[in-house]
Image (tube, rainbow, N blue to C red):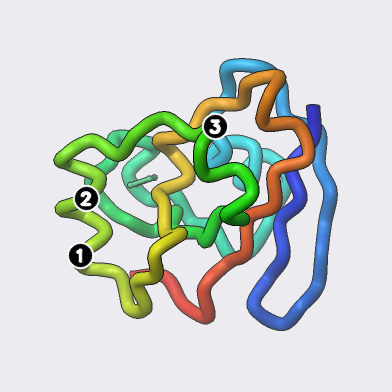
Amino acid sequence: PQVVFIEYDGSQRTVEAPIGKSLMQVAVDNGVPGILGDCGGSCSCATCHGYVDPAFADKLPPKTETEIFMLEGVPVLKEESRLCCQIRMQPELDGIVVRLPEEQV
Ligand code: FES
């Protein structure tokens, strides 16, 4: 399966995402600059913030309370905001589009 990351400047990359790997790790492994992942995926830094295409909203795992709390600290929170370390690749997420914010925390 693949993930499409779209940087704030509009540049787009499609990368392979192994099943079970978090979208944050996929971004870091592929050098996607808009995702930092400072905490290593433990939902405690919010530098993996992205806007997930609403078309995939009902396929995503629900936000944990910790994720909701961390998202409150991001510069521009939107309805489709998620922390990419909290989404693991699944077959039904193939082709998921994640737009990256102008800046991370
Ligand atoms: Fe730190 Fe996602 S990598 S919250």
Residue at numbered disc 2: 68
Residues tagged 3 and 1 counted as in contact (Cβ below 8 A): no
What type is the residue that disc 2 sits on?
Answer: Ile
User: Under tag 3, what secondary structure?
Assistant: helix
**Is 105 above or below relative to 39?**
below
Nearer the camera: disc 2 or disc 3: 3
What type is the residue that disc 1 sits on?
Answer: Glu
Ligand 1 neighbours mark 2 (CB distance < 8 Å): no
Residue 3 falls left or right of residue 55 = right
Residue 13 lies in quadrant? bottom right
Residue at numbered disc 1: 72
Quick one: label 3 or label 1, which is nearer the N terminus? 3
| Residue for point 67% across, 39% down | 29
**Is 78 above or below relative to 81?**
below
Quick one: label 2 or label 3, which is nearer the N terminus? 3
| Residue for point 51% across, 37% down | 58
Residue 84, image x and y in percent? 48, 45
Nearer the camera: disc 3 or disc 1: 3
Residues tagged 2 and 1 counted as in contact (Cβ below 8 A): yes
Q: Nearer the viewer, residue 31 or 8?
A: 8
What type is the residue that disc 3 sits on?
Answer: Lys
Badge number at residue 85: none
Residue at numbered disc 3: 59
Task: Measure the alpha-carbon separation of dots 3 and 1.
Answer: 22 Å
| Residue for point 76% across, 50% down | 4
**Is 39 above or below relative to 77?**
above
Crowd rating for badge 2 (residues with CA inside 10 Å; few <14, some 14–19, many 20+) = some
Task: Measure the alpha-carbon separation of dots 2 and 3.
Answer: 18 Å
| Residue for point 71% across, 19% down | 91
Task: Measure the alpha-carbon separation of dots 2 and 1.
Answer: 7 Å
